[in-house]
Amino acid sequence: MTRLWIKNPLGVFTADDTPDAPDASGGLVVENAVITEVLARGAEPSAPVEEVFDASQHVLTPGLINTHHHFYQTLTRAWGPVADAELFPWLTGLYPVWARLTPRALELATTVALAELLLSGCTTAADHHYVFPPGLDEAIDIQVSAVRRLGLRATLTRGSMTLGQDDGGLPPQSVVQPLDTILEDSARLVRTYHETGPGAQVQIALAPCSPFSVTTDAMRESARLATDLDVRLHTHLAETLDEEDFCRERFGMRTVDYLESVGWLTDRTWLGHGIHFDDEEISRLGEAGTAVAHCPTSNMRLASGIARVLELEDAGVPVGLGVDGSASNDASTMVAEVRQALYLQRLRYGASVPVHRALAWGTRGSARVLGRDDVGVLAVGNQADLALWRLDELRFSGSHDPVAALVLCAADRADRAMVGGQWRVVDGRIPDLDVDALVAEHSAAARGLISG
């Protein structure tokens, strides 16, 4: 029950867009895992505090929130044979490698991804794991353990693939599972790990991989099960024009029509990428409340296209940011994704897209995408999930607006990060994590995966 005052930050971005949002230039009071006071400059806490953190050299923001990732892909970053490929050849080149994934390799990959996210100011992350080769039946259990060990919050999705190459899909048969197996394991994971309510650390969602790797039955039955269990739904959609062509040829319809036909056009759903929507489809997504995880770096890396983020938001679509897998990004640096989102959207809409709007996509917007209202905004009653950033590196020298400097001067590491009132990053390091040992073993696992 210690009361902590994070006092007088150099700059602050609260992501609070309510008309009566309080001035937070005097900092925050944190008590029992939540924010209990937001203070104006010169104001004092309403009751004594046991600890004071002098934030006069720090910019204060909500903890960033990552809405789309594939943790396991940290093992296949910058792999030469697919370094210059678009999505479909990139996938077909990598699937045989990923089919050799082992439990220990996944544990290492997940730990690396979570650590990298934490160090980049991210306090909540969603992962889409859909590769289940023989021997990796407990993949999501492994991820839960890693999340709890590092202390982030996470929405872990039980992904799936049911449409293999033998039936016209992209993945090899070795990573395709029977639908009954998928549904049974999904229900088990929800019963075992899914938490609800404010402060939930681990949540489970259901996530058939994509229209080109699952059957319509898998999509429909996953939607029914998600409704029965009251959990969210996630998939890739409208990422490339190849996917659009696939849906036309196989299902006789465009991607959003397909989404509606299988019962997914709801506010329970969030979509990875969401690039190739026309005006009418954007309107339908907004009316349904279906959300989009914008993944700018991955979209540029694979030359997939530019999402119409401003039009999606104006139509009522919740939009957040995702780093995507570390084999198509090839990093897990959330604050860098804010910068990429800003610049990519300025390329589409012009230089007047505000810096603060990009930060809102990575905080408040991402929280909405994951169906959460207890994180993403520095406000009384919300979880004390936050990041503190120093501006004393060479890259920031000469900068004037502290909040704008985070984005425009390319911040890449938080000095501190807090989750639920607990410091998870201190002085740019994760306490009790031997990064050198982790890198050594993870790198060896990555080499072993490639060599077979």
Image (spheres, grey):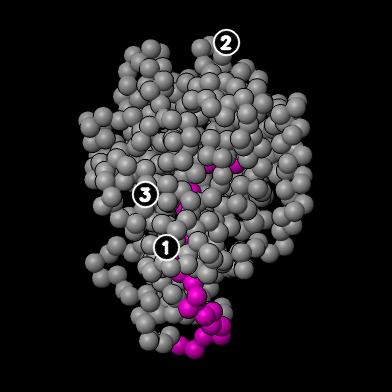
Residue drawn at x 35%, y 80% as measured from the top left: 40
Q: Is residue 206 magenta?
A: no
Q: Residues within 10 Å of mark 3 (few under 14, many from 20)?
A: many
Q: Amino acid at mark 1?
A: Ala
Tell me if 365 is positioned left or right of 424 in this view. left
Query: Element type at marker 2?
Result: helix
The residue that label 1 is drawn on is 405
C-alpha distance separating marks 1 and 2: 51 Å
Q: Is residue 58 magenta?
A: yes
The residue that label 3 is drawn on is 342
Residue drawn at x 50%, y 22% as measured from the top left: 88
Query: Element type at marker 1?
Result: helix
Q: Quadrant of the N terminus?
A: bottom right
Q: Residues within 10 Å of mark 2 (few under 14, many from 20)?
A: few
Say whether residue 258 is visible. no
C-alpha distance separating marks 2 and 3: 41 Å
Q: Position of residue 136 (x, y in %)?
A: 69, 32
The residue that label 2 is drawn on is 166
Query: Element type at marker 3?
Result: helix
Q: Amino acid at mark 2?
A: Asp
Earlier sequence position, callout 1 versus callout 3: 3
Q: Quadrant of residue 172?
A: top right
Q: Is residue 434 above or below residue 348?
A: below
Closer to the observer: label 1 or label 2?
1
Residue drawn at x 62%, y 25% as measured from the top left: 81
Q: Position of residue 211 (x, y in %)?
A: 44, 23
